[in-house]
Amino acid sequence: MCGIVGAVAERSITAILLEGLKRLEYRGYDSAGVAVFTNDGTLARMRRPGKVSELEQALEAEPLVGRLGIAHTRWATHGAPCERNAHPHFSGDLAVVHNGIIENHEALREQLKALGYVFTSDTDTEVIAHLLSHKLKDLTDLTVALKATVKELHGAYGLAVISAKQPDRLVAARSGSPLVIGLGLGENFLASDQLALRQVTDRFMYLEEGDIADIRRDSVQIWDLDGKAVERETVQYRDGAEAADKGEFRHFMLKEIHEQPAVVQRTLEGRMSQNQVLVQAFGPQAAELFAKVRNVQIVACGTSYHAGMVARYWLEELAGIPCQVEVASEFRYRKVVVQPDTLFVTISQSGETADTLAALRNAKELGFLASLAICNVGISSLVRESDLTLLTQAGREIGVASTKAFTTQLVGLLLLTLSLGQVRGTLAAGVEATLVEELRRLPTRLGEALAMDSTVEKIAELFAEKNHTLFLGRGAQFPVAMEGALKLKEISYIHAEAYPAGELKHGPLALVDNDMPVVTVAPNNELLEKLKSNLQEVRARGGQLIVFADEKAGMTNGEGTHVVHMPHIHDILSPILYTIPLQLLSYYVAVLKGTDVDQPRNLAKSVTVE
Ligand code: G6P
């Protein structure tokens, strides 16, 4: 993870770097730092543990003024989050910031120590700084020395380097961690995400894997993996920089929860006719490829993985296609047997998650029929490297706990299911038409579920003093329960586990007592009676039940049972609707506990390291 910003300009760049870091805090926020080649000709830095605001305060007290600089916001991988380990790291006249993990850092550290280099941090990044310093002794030119340095690195890196001896340039290298150059007039910039630079430019050049760049005020030169000089396309964004504004809401997470009717509507727009899904929404070759699909393999991480788990129920029930779902970090290291004609589907909000991207790259060698990305970022690596794409239209998600990205992914996956069923002739036209109609009504239903906001806020009080919670679901509601448990642990730090309700008596029932609230989602479907029996098992052990139930499910409040009635919805769409109260529940529990809702401890929005 971590965020990188760099600038080479005629004007003072510290404020630009700081603004960029604030926009990148979603990538990590346990410490931050900046290094500037100051107007008095020295390389100076300021680093602070904690959020970018701590660094900002330190710089207000002691400004750094210069026209060349690099900055970093960190998510610790090697070494605790403290000032000494914060980037930039120095070696002689060099300053380096790094995103990624250098796997052979221990061996390199020993070699460099033997050569007399002294280490002041526990990071793998400091190894890069010293190694580059060492190469510069013979190779003098910064980009030449950087090319020689990265040849010795194993692992992943996005790197930005400045040198007090060559103060007209900012050099960069990319392998496994995204970097983009922002093009200005008489000034140029670098960042790990274009969002960091939207305040200064709308023109960008994306570095590709293995690229090295020499960025000066009025030129940019790039070399590819083989050392060949290359041109990279310039992309211009005409829309205004996306607003990072909480509006009337106290947190971004609450704002994003309430945006769901609108973004679901946007994700559906232009993708359905009166009674059918438009298959070409997945790309011009989609119809031809979908006709050949006999299996689906879904790979994703975190919340996106839970979306994939829901899709499995849909794909098998509606399209009659066998589906497997796996977390990317497992899939990428497993010997996988690929069935003929299997579509490889990745799901990712960011499109930059390291494990998902690596799984896609491995999949290309394994003989899948084609790859499809369901992703929220059109310019992401995942989208660029997949054969087919469906972009979710969630807009920028800032809260680290994913909410609107999840529900729009579910919408995208249901569109995929209907398309596959349609093209392969396994889904009756009438069923498709009904579901298209239901999808059209979904934003209104989501709005109704959001109207329960204050009811859920009240229920949250039951959790404020608890340390453990169990989430139960059956069928496609089991992954919804998993997502509910993930949300609660991510932002309220309460231990939460999800179980298929039928597994209760095979172990977790032993944990149930008065101190363990049990949350469950109960749409009115054929599993309802079975679920009700499971809930009796909980009540019989004194467990407190919180049930989000269909208004027609015949469930009512009683001693130790709190029922919240949900608007009625078609069973297939119920996982999307029932996600809403669980998001609200974790949000209000976290608010009661006083945690940092939008930036919970130890987590990051975009996980671009393994
Ligand atoms: C991180 C985020 C999660 C997200 C997961 C996968 O852990 O905190 O919210 O679900 O990464 O991210 P992706 O961008 O691939 O969906």
Image (spheres, helix red, strand yellow):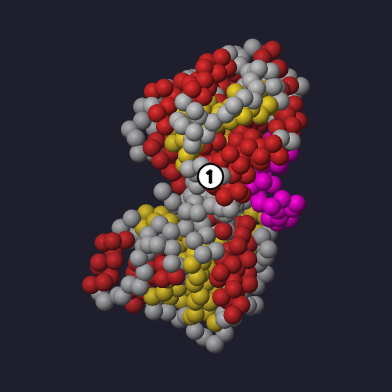
Q: Is residue 250 left or right of residue 375?
A: right
> Does 448 lie within the magenta span?
no
Of residues 173 and 452, the one drawn nearer to the viewer in this rendering: 452
158 or 367, nearer to the observer = 158
- Regarding residue 496, the answer to whether it shows in the image is yes
Residue placed at 34% from the left, 77% from the top? 137
Is residue 574 visible in the rendered structure shown here? no
Q: Establish if 76 lies above or below 477.
A: below
Magenta highlight range: 239-264
Q: Which residue: 64% across, 35% down?
A: 580
- Residue 247 included in the magenta stretch of the image: yes
What residue is shown at x 64% (from left), y 47% (from top)? 253
- In the image, residue 61 sits, relative to residue 263, either above or below, namely below
User: Can you tell which quarter of the image residue 187 is in?
Assistant: bottom right
Q: Nearer the viewer, residue 227 or 257?
A: 257
- Front position in the image: 482 or 550: 550
Residue 151 position in % (x across, y down): 35, 60
From the viewer's perspective, is 264 left or right of 310? right
Compared with residue 378, is residue 309 higher up or lower down, i.e. above or below?
A: above
Number of marks in the image? 1
Which type of secondary structure does the marked residue at label 1 adopt?
A: loop
Name the spot of residue 95 as percent of width and height, x first. Answer: 45, 73
Q: Position of residue 163 (x, y in %)?
A: 46, 76
The correct choice, above or below, for 556 with respect to 137 in the image is: above
Identified by mark 1, the residue type is Glu
Disc 1 crowd, CA 10 A, few/some/many (<14, 14-19, 20+): few
Residue plotted at (66% across, 39% down)? 458
Give the residue number, with chain letter if any, for mark 1. 465
User: In this image, 430 relative to 425: left or right?
Assistant: right
